[in-house]
Amino acid sequence: MASKCHQAREDDSQRENTLKEELNKTIKEQKIVVDELSNLKKNRRVYVQQSNSNIFFLAEKGEALSACKKSLDRMKKDYQDM
C-alpha cells in the first residue's frame, strides 16, 4: 500500500515537472513573439491566426502586441503559481 502511494506521488511530481517545462518553453516562445512584434517597422502588416483554424486575419500591430504581452504575463503568473 505504501509503495502505491509513493508511486502516485512520483507520478504527480513527474507530471507537474513536465507541465512546468512545457509552460516554460511556451513562455520563451511568447517572449520571442513580443520581441518580434516590438521591433517591426510601422508599415509592416501583422496577421493573427484564428483559434483552431488555419485562417489568418489582418490585425493592428498595437493590438496584437498588447494581446501577446497580456498572454505572456498570464503565463508567467501561472508558472509562478506552480
Image (cartoon, grey):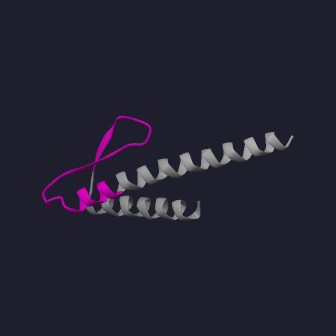
User: In the rendered image, which quarter is residue 24 located in?
Assistant: bottom left
Q: Quadrant of the N terminus?
A: top right
- Residue located 28% across and 63% down the image: 62
Image x and y of residue 64, in percent: 32, 57
Look at the picture and state if 77 lies above or below 50. below
- The residue most toward the right is 1
Question: Is 48 a magenta residue?
Answer: yes
- The residue most toward the top is 54
Image x and y of residue 63, in percent: 32, 61
Look at the picture and state if 6 lies above or below 55. below
- Residue located 44% across and 37% down the image: 52
Camera-nearest residue between 33 and 66: 33
- Residue located 76% across and 45% down the image: 6
Question: Is 80 a magenta residue?
Answer: no
Camera-nearest residue between 21 and 78: 21
Image x and y of residue 82, in percent: 59, 59
- Total of numbered circles in the picture? 0
Q: Is residue 38 left or right of residue 20?
A: left
Camera-nearest residue between 20 and 49: 20
Q: Is residue 58 left or right of residue 6?
A: left
Q: Which residues are magenta?
A: 31-58
User: In the rendered image, which quarter is residue 51 located in?
Assistant: top left
- Residue located 37% across and 54% down the image: 28
Image x and y of residue 12, in percent: 67, 46
Q: Is residue 7 left or right of residue 75?
A: right
Camera-nearest residue between 8 and 79: 8
- The residue most toward the front is 3
